[in-house]
């Protein structure tokens, strides 16, 4: 469990609720969004919208 580095948005809250409903923990398992780019929630690396996994740390969405 890492500290939340960014302020949660409405979308984050909705998604957290979605994960909670599915019985998952509330760790983010999808891309964050920053300036219209995908942001890795693990290392914070920015990627183009076409990215399917983080080229920095190898993280990918669990979906
Ligand atoms: Zn990463």
Image: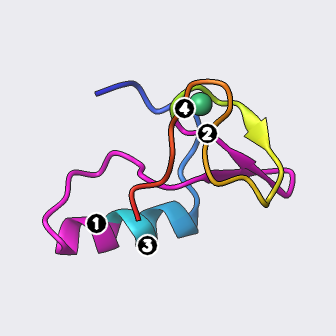
* Mark closer to the chain start, 2 or 1: 1
The residues bearing labels 3 and 2 have C-alpha atoms spaced at a distance of 19 Å
Report the side of 47 relative to 32 (left or right). Answer: right
Q: Which mark is residue 14?
A: 3
Which residue is located at x 60 percent, y 45 percent?
53
The residues bearing labels 1 and 4 have C-alpha atoms spaced at a distance of 22 Å
Q: Which mark is residue 58?
A: 4
* Mark closer to the chain start, 1 or 4: 1
Mark 4, ligand 1, within 8 Å: the answer is: yes
The residues bearing labels 2 and 1 have C-alpha atoms spaced at a distance of 18 Å
* Mark closer to the chain start, 4 or 3: 3
Q: Is residue 34 above or below residue 54?
A: below
Residue 25 position, x and y percent, is 21, 51
- In this figure, which residue is indicated by the disc labeled 1? 19
Looking at the rendering, the stretch of residues picked out in magenta corresponds to 17-41
Which residue is located at x 50 percent, y 55 percent?
30
Report the image quarter containing ligand 1.
top right
Quarter of the image where one finds residue 57 = top right
* Mark closer to the chain start, 2 or 4: 2
Label 1 residue SS: helix
The residues bearing labels 4 and 3 have C-alpha atoms spaced at a distance of 25 Å
- In this figure, which residue is indicated by the disc labeled 2? 40
Quarter of the image where one finds residue 13 = bottom left
The residues bearing labels 3 and 1 have C-alpha atoms spaced at a distance of 9 Å
Mark 2 vs mark 4: give the one in front: 4
């Amino acid at each position: 469990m890492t500290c939340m580095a960014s302020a949660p948005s409405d979308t984050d809250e909705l998604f957290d609720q979605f994960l909670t409903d599915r019985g998952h923990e509330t760790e983010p398992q999808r891309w964050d969004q920053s300036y219209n780019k995908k942001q890795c929630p693990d290392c914070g690396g920015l990627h183009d919208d076409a990215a399917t996994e983080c080229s920095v740390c190898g993280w990918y969405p669990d979906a």
